[in-house]
Image (tube, helix red, strand yellow):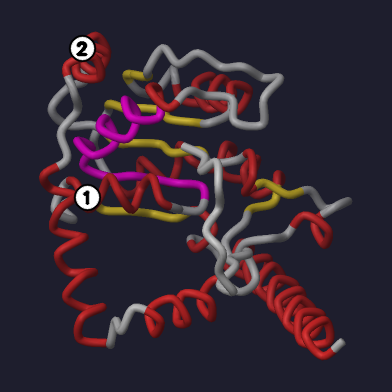
Amino acid sequence: MKLKNKPITEIKFSPYNYKEELKKLKKKYFINEDVNKKFNFISNLSYQKFIPNQKIQKKINKILLPKNFIGIHIRSTDREIKIENFIKKIQFEEMIFNFQIKNMSKNLLNFIKSNTKIKNIFISSDDKIYKKKFFEKLKDHFNIYSNNSKYDIKNFRQTSGEDFLVELFCLSKSKMIISTLGGAVPKAACLISNNEIKLHKWTQNKNFNILFNYLILIIFNLKKIKSKLFNYLKSRI
């Protein structure tokens, strides 16, 4: 939902000032640390009350998910970067190179076999091509389940809000989630399940990945400093 008239405020969020602006917002509305902790506690508990509506549940039922399954969550779109443009594209603390996703696809079979005996896999992705690639890698070794998502590859966000919810609630029923880099979807799925799901972030699994995580963090923080400096100089003019 977009507001026709945006509120007039000095508090303006960007990827590089989120924490600082959030502190200003809390201060403006007299939200101290104790109130904040209580709010976060109640907020996290409220996820357990989330249930799909009738239309979403009908789509979930059609997938015929077994009782025990692993969720594979492949987040790309706004979180995926390439070596030729990564400095320009980095805008979050958690991002992933395309070759790291390729590395996940290549090594995922062995990782699953070494961590669980479950033979059922649910694949969730915001990218049609990656979803197909992971399916091809795993189909001969596991029973594969997925939502019949509609993808519009012309759009940056390829899937609809409805398919997003279907996959979120499916992931919340899994025993384990293996995600490219985590993010809001696996976190929400874990909260809905009362944190009964074991979550693995591929970017944190190997030293190979951790090295690139540090690189992304360094560049992100350099951009953050640049943004702060620019805003400070702008305010002085």
Magenta stretch bounds: 164-180
At 48% from the left and 40% from the top, the residue drawn is 108
Q: Residue 2 placed where, x, y %? A: 52, 40
Is 137 rendered above or below residue 199?
A: above
Which part of the image, by quadrant, shows the C terminus?
Answer: bottom right
What residue is pinned by disc 1? 197
The answer to if 48 sits in the magenta stretch is no
Q: Few, some or many C-alpha atoms within 10 Å of disc 1 (few <14, some 14-19, many ≥20)?
A: many
> Looking at numbered disc 1 in the image, what kind of residue is underneath it?
Ile
Give the quadrant of residue 127.
top right
User: Quick one: label 1 or label 2, which is nearer the N terminus?
Assistant: 2
Q: Secondary structure at mark 2?
A: helix
What residue is pinned by disc 2? 58
Front disc: 1 or 2: 2
At 19% from the left and 19% from the top, the residue drawn is 57
Q: Circles 1 and 2: CB distance less than 8 Å?
A: no
Q: Few, some or many C-alpha atoms within 10 Å of disc 2 (few <14, some 14-19, many ≥20)?
A: few
Is 139 rendered above or below residue 9?
A: above
Q: Nearer the viewer, residue 193 or 70?
A: 193
In the orientation shown, which residue stands out farthest toward the top? 62
